[in-house]
Amino acid sequence: MGQVRRIDQVFIEITNACNFHCATCPCSQQERPTRHMELDVFRRVVDDIADTRIASRIALHVLGEPLLHPHLLEAVGHAKRPSRCP
């Protein structure tokens, strides 16, 4: 199998909910329903990133405001476990 190419960081959209109305943001124009990523899905994504060592950083951003996720502290805690950090 070929060598895995490392990237600097992976962006995870943990939620597409947002309580701001920024003029330059497409959030208010999106047609997807507003949702939060399930915590077990987030954990699997983080575990896959850690297991493959494809990236050394995870950013919680694409659309939406990550601080609105109801399980943000648990998600960050999982991603920051000592076994995950280089």
Image (cartoon, grey):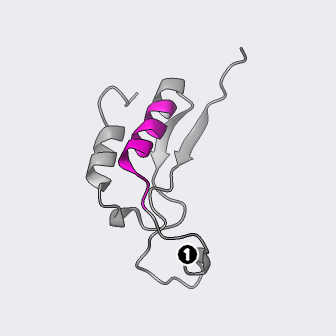
Q: Residue at x 50, y 31 (%)?
A: 48
- Nearer the observer, 68 or 85: 68
Q: Residue at x 44, y 44 (%)?
A: 41
Q: Which of 6 and 13 is in front in this view?
A: 13
Q: Is residue 37 within the magenta segment?
A: yes
Magenta portion: prevailing SS class? helix
Q: Quadrant of the N terminus?
A: top right
Residue 3, image quadrant: top right
Q: How crowded is mark 1: few (under 14 residues within 10 Å), some or many (20 or more)?
A: many
Q: What kind of residue is marked 1?
A: Cys
Above/below status of 24 relative to 56: below
Rendered location of residue 31, percent (x, y): 61, 74
Q: In which quarter of the image is residue 44?
A: top left
**57 is within the stretch colored magenta:** no
Magenta span covers which residues? 36-48
Q: Is residue 86 left or right of residue 72?
A: right
* Residue designated by label 1: 27
In the figure, 46 relative to 4: above or below?
Answer: below
